[in-house]
Each structure stands twice: as structure tokens, then as C-alpha cells.
Amino acid sequence: MAKQKQKFQVWGNRLNTPPDELNIGFCAGRDVVSLPMADEVLLEYDVWTNMAHARMLKHVGVLTDQELLEIRTGLSALLAEHRAGTFQLDPVKEDVHINVEHYITFVRQIAAGKKIHTGRSRNDQVSTDMRLFLRAEVIDLAESLIHLIRTILKRAEAETGSIMPGFTHYQPAMMTTAGHWLTGWSQGLLRDVTSLVQNLKTMNRSPLGAAASFGTSWPINREYAAELLGFDAVEENSLDCISSRGENETRVASSIAILMNHLSIVSQDIILLSTPYYGFIEVDDKYVTGSSIMPQKRNPDFAEIIRSKASMTQGSLISLLGIQKGAMSGYNRDTQQTKYLIMDLLRESRDVPSILGGVITSLRFNRSTMRQQCESGFINSTDIADWLAQKHGLSFRDCYEVVSLAVKYSEAQGKVTVAALEKAVAEQGLKVSFSGNDRDFIDSPEKSLLNKQHTGAPSASSVKRMIHSQNESLDQMERDINGVREKIRIAQERAFGD
Ligand code: ARG
């Protein structure tokens, strides 16, 4: 049998550059990978919560120095085993919390292990673990989003003069530039980073010490434990600490749902504008996918996956809201399932910004095609009406009527002609004599754009101002996130150090 020479690629030889590995995995998704257990994901955070709790118990005199040392040794051994892949959660022990306590007390035979659960409950443990987990995930997501926005702004900078049609109702509306389009994307995403950073601030308070819901008679020091976990403060009322489980998850899910809607619109723009019928942009070979039957295909699967992930996110958000809706104050097992929803949601959205970043970095703008589409299709009609009103002292409504007539009279030419305008003006009983300046304006997309100088407009100078201010907002977001990161680093050093 002849040996296969080429590297196997499911859709053949159509492309010039090899596909991006991350994108292949992104598009294949759960078809070919399995998910980790929820409490396996929490294990590292549970060890941290245990460390903080044990140190606090020693701080208030419930544990001796020696007992703390033994517990810490046990927790470190567990962490090492987990990282080496040799520790498996035992389903019989229900969840990560009981598994950890069992490991210390029975596997490691540490007598003080029997004291580790003093003054706490699995209820406040899991709420604490989840805040630590969420905090880390939100930081990572916000940072990759910032990176994506910077990528978009870089592309916008190079495309401030790239004229293209803009659409309303999917129909040609007014012209804009690719730079304006791109800074439109990034402005929405910037709000998403802002809301994620706000979520971080809201969630960064410690529920540890709330115990089952109603506190404890042990002389715990919640503030001390909170510091070891990098929280800004204690979430005070012990009942609310437990009843509110799922609330931060929901806030984050809501921020991500809006973010994913933005990214879904970006995806839809890319899908549509890259079809041969528009041909405005071209997705690089690295990010297109082929077909197992049609050899010519260049499909934007990544963008379709993003659109559907936006939909999945909305489903999770609604489920999260529902779980918290009607249960009585205190712990209810319903909330266990908030873990699965938020973990799935975060897992599904994690790679989206970096995939889109790669796509946008390598996206080609077909400037001549985009400009050509601005030379016909009546896309400068509103600009002409504005121009006539401004230059010939008429009202906007009169000019609107004139131009709408002129569009009708020049339909065969595909663009507003001066002859059609003259006819329309005469018919409306207005007096306008058209000059060379008028003719130049009507034929120049650049001139139309140049007139749009206000804040947020598509002219190059307005877009440059937006790029500048968006970059400044990103700098501030980065400073905020770095502040939280630093706090976490110091807390981890104190919790895990000697
Ligand atoms: N695995 C549980 C959860 O995630 C821990 C809390 C169990 N508490 C209880 N009272 N049954 O919610």
C-alpha cells in the first residue's frame, strides 16, 4: 500500500498557509474533548481556603503552632499530588471539601486534621472557593479582552482613511471608514471590560466564617482570613454570605452575555463582509475552515461558533438567575449547580478573544473594493442633502426632497448626477446654480467624510481621537487589574509561605 505523503488535513489542499491549531480546537470544541470535574477545578482554591482558615484558627488560639504546621504540610502535599496528577477526587466523599479533609486526616494521618473544620461549614467554604475561582477567571478574561481591544485599535489606526459603505437594515446607508467601524467594535468591548472590572470589585469580599449561614461560637477572625485570601473586606452578614451564592456568578455571566453579544456582532460583520458578494475583507487562510466535500470552500467557522456561544451564554445566564430566584434564605443545594453553569460559561468564552484577536490581526481590508462600493449605490445621498443645505442656504427638508427626486432620476446611472439634481431643483421651485465645487463634492467620498469632524464621527481625525481615548481607558483598566493581581500575589505568599 502506498504511504500517505502529506500531513493529514480533513479539508484538503485548498489553503496556502496551514490552519491555526488553536482555531481547529476552537471549532472542534467538545466534539473531541471532555470536561474536568467541577470540584477538580476548585481544588487549588479549596486548598488556599483551607490554608487561610487554618492560619486563622492558629491566630485566634484554636490550633497550636505544631498543629498548624502539620495541616500546612498535609495541604502542600495534596497540592503537589494534584499538580502531579496523582490525586483523584473520590466520588464517595461527595465533594472537594470532604476529600481534602479526608486526605489530611486519614491519608496523611494528621491528627489535627480533625480540627480543620472548626468554626466553618462546606457552605462558606464553597462560596469562598467560588469567589477565588471567579476572581481569577474574570482577571484572565478581562486581560485577554484588553489585548483584543488593543489589537482592534492598532488595525483601526491603519484604516482611518479606508472608506467603506455603512449599512442600516443591511441596506447601503452612508459611507464610513474601516477605522470608524473598528473603533465601534472596540468601544462596546471597552464597556465590557469596565463591567468585568466592576464585577471584580463587587465580588472581592470574603464569605468565609459565615459557616452554615448563621456564624459560629468559635472566636474566629474573619478579617484576618480575608486578608490571606486577597479579599478587600469581609462580606458581613453571615446569612447573606450563603444566601447570595450564585449572585456574583450571575453578575459575571451577565457581563459576559453582553460581551458575547458584542463579539457575535463582530463575527456576523466578518461573516457577511467577507463573502465574495461583499468582498470588503478577507479572513486569513489560518482561520478559515474547508469542507470535506466541496474543495473550494473557505468558511468562517470560528465566527459561527462565536455566535452560538453567545446564545449558550444567554442560556446559562437565565439558568443562573432562575436558580437563585425562589429559595428560602440560607443554604440550599440548588446553588451547587451554579458551579456547573458558570464554569461551562467561562470555559466556552475563554478562548474567544484570542481567536478573534488572531483573526483581526491577519484580516485583509480590500480598500479598493470598499471604496468602489461608495462610488455608486447612492450612499452619499444624505451628504449631498447636507451639502446643499449648508452651501446654498436651504433647509435640510427641502434638500432631502430634492435629493430623493434626484436619486429617482439618476437610477440608471447608479449615482446622483448633477443633471438629475438640476431637474429636481427646478421641479421643487428652488433656485440653485451648481458650481464646480458642488460637482467635486458629489463625486468625492473623501470630501463627504472630511466634513464629519464632530466627536465620534467617521473622519480620520475623529477616529484618531477615539483611538487615543480608548487606549487611555484601557491603561486605567490595566492599572485596576494589576492592583488586584498584586493584592492576590501578596495574599498567596502569606497564605502559602513559611
Ligand atoms: N458541594 C456542595 C456545593 O457545591 C458543598 C456544600 C454542601 N453543603 C450542604 N449543606 N450540603 O454546594
Image (cartoon, rainbow, N blue to C red):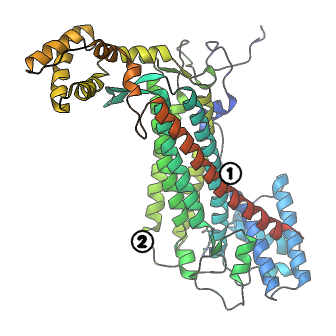
Q: Quadrant of the C terminus?
A: bottom right
Mark 2, Cα crowd under 10 Å, few <14 / some 14-19 / many 20+, is few
Looking at the rendering, which quadrant does residue 448 occupy? top left
Q: Quadrant of the N terminus?
A: top right
Residue beneath the point at 41% across and 13% down: 372
- Residue 54 in picture, x, y percent from top left: 79, 78
302 sits to left or right of 24 = left
Q: Which residue in the structure is indicated by mark 1? A: 36
Q: Nearer the viewer, residue 96 or 251?
A: 251
Mark 1, Cα crowd under 10 Å, few <14 / some 14-19 / many 20+, is few
Q: Amino acid at mark 2?
A: Gly
- Residue 74 in picture, x, y percent from top left: 87, 70
Name the outermost residue toward the right.
66
Residue beneath the point at 58% across and 23% down: 288
310 sits to left or right of 411 = right
Q: Nearer the viewer, residue 446 or 368?
A: 446
Numbered label attached to residue 326 = 2
- Residue 169 in picture, x, y percent from top left: 30, 31
Residue beneath the point at 77% across and 7% down: 2
Q: Amino acid at mark 1?
A: Pro
Numbered label attached to residue 85 = none
Q: Secondary structure at mark 2?
A: loop
Residue 30 seen: no
Q: Is mark 1 within 8 Å of ligand 1?
A: no
